[in-house]
Image (spheres, rainbow, N blue to C red):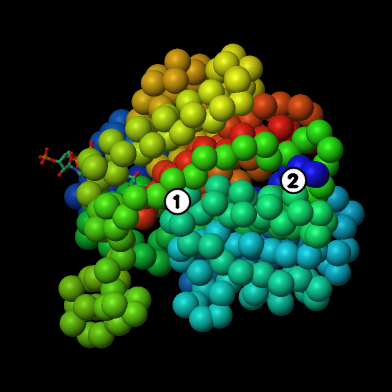
Amino acid sequence: MPKAAITAVGGYVSDKVLSNADLEKMMDTNDEWITSRTGIHERRVLPKDQAVSDIGVDVVNQLLEKTNTSNEEIDLLICATCTGDYIIPDTANNICYKAGLTNTFGYDINAACSGFLFALYTASQFIETGRYKKVIVIGGEKMTSYMNYDDRTTSILFGDGGGGVLLEPSEKFGVIDAILKGDGVGSQMLKIDAGGSLNPMNQERLDNKENFVTQDGKQVFKRAVTGMSTTVEEVLNRNNLEPNEINWIVPHQANERIINSVARQLSFPMDRVMLNIDKYGNTSAGTIPLCLWEYESQLNKGDNIILTAFGGGFTWGSLYLKWAY
Ligand code: UT7
């Protein structure tokens, strides 16, 4: 059975920066609080006329160019997002259309901040069957469309951006194992209340600002640390791996203190943990591909890499792969 190897990675953020100093002018907060509690210095904001498909199109073009692949060769594109361009149509389909992927079918996966992990593992099954040769996985968000800038505990955390990977069959490299989990107890602890079929948008809900992300930050924090560290441990044990055999852990970037706690629980050194939350904040399904994109030049063929994420749902898990180039 072939493995699904990552053969290229791309990333995209807009140039527009929303710094802690900018937020100080918008709400009662300060750089010292945000930096010490979250590790975030700034985030990126997509312009009004751009959305997740624009991230996806840019990333697709990078992937095709890097691997000398033509548009017609892509079989499937999965887009992980919880902030897609529209409710209908799905964003993956829109990315395929705008990027000229004429032989590609696509669909979205919404697993909030775990979306990229869930989409990558799903996509890898298509390669493993032998039926699909080239699959693109995108993880991207326009979180700023769902931020209530009167809610200082949540709005300071999130930014826009994302990335993606091309998957191709390989004998030796690629996705080896994953443990993915879910627990609906989290459904009320991290959510956007209105705009779905249960609470369709109306003026009252807009006035109550129910169209924005709300969360129980403390509960999410605790569950994130436990969820990520235990599934990393489970994946290591199942594959007879010691932490010193892992070259990189790529954690979802929600809060630097969460990442530090996970590394501490695992006795894993922070210099092998990818970190870029200071520049982008939490881009939900976008954080893991954005990390891979930024650290690409430091990765080597055969590196053992663990991706781990936790998000709304709750959804969480860890995935083990061998880097292919
Ligand atoms: O991908 C998953 C998505 N979400 C997460 O991962 C979020 C996980 N949770 C967290 O990251 C943290 O819980 C937060 C960053 C959201 C909050 O940090 P905290 O250390 O749990 O702070 P807190 O909510 O306990 O608030 C402590 C204090 C409060 O003041 P008092 O009541 O002690 O006087 C808050 O009102 O900090 C205050 N505070 C702020 N002060 C300045 C809350 N937000 C801010 C702010 N600026 N932005």
Q: Residue at x 85, y 50 (%)?
A: 67
Q: Nearer the viewer, residue 218 or 28?
A: 218
Label 1 residue near ligand 1, CB within 8 Å: yes
Task: Locate residue 261, reporting x and y percent.
Answer: 36, 25
Disc 1: which residue: 113
The crowding category of the residue bearing disc 1, from other C-alpha atoms within 10 Å (few below 14, some 14 to 19, many at least 20), is: many
Residue 82 relative to residue 91: left or right: left
**Res 64 label:** none
Task: Locate residue 244, reporting x and y percent.
Answer: 59, 14
Q: Is residue 136 above or below residue 201?
A: above
> SS for tag 1?
helix
Task: Locate residue 162, reporting x and y percent.
Answer: 57, 54
The crowding category of the residue bearing disc 2, from other C-alpha atoms within 10 Å (few below 14, some 14 to 19, many at least 20), is: many
> SS for tag 2?
strand
Q: Residue at x 75, y 49 (%)?
A: 128
- Dot 1 amino acid type: Cys
If the image is split into quadrants, where does the C terminus sit? top right
Disc 2: which residue: 4
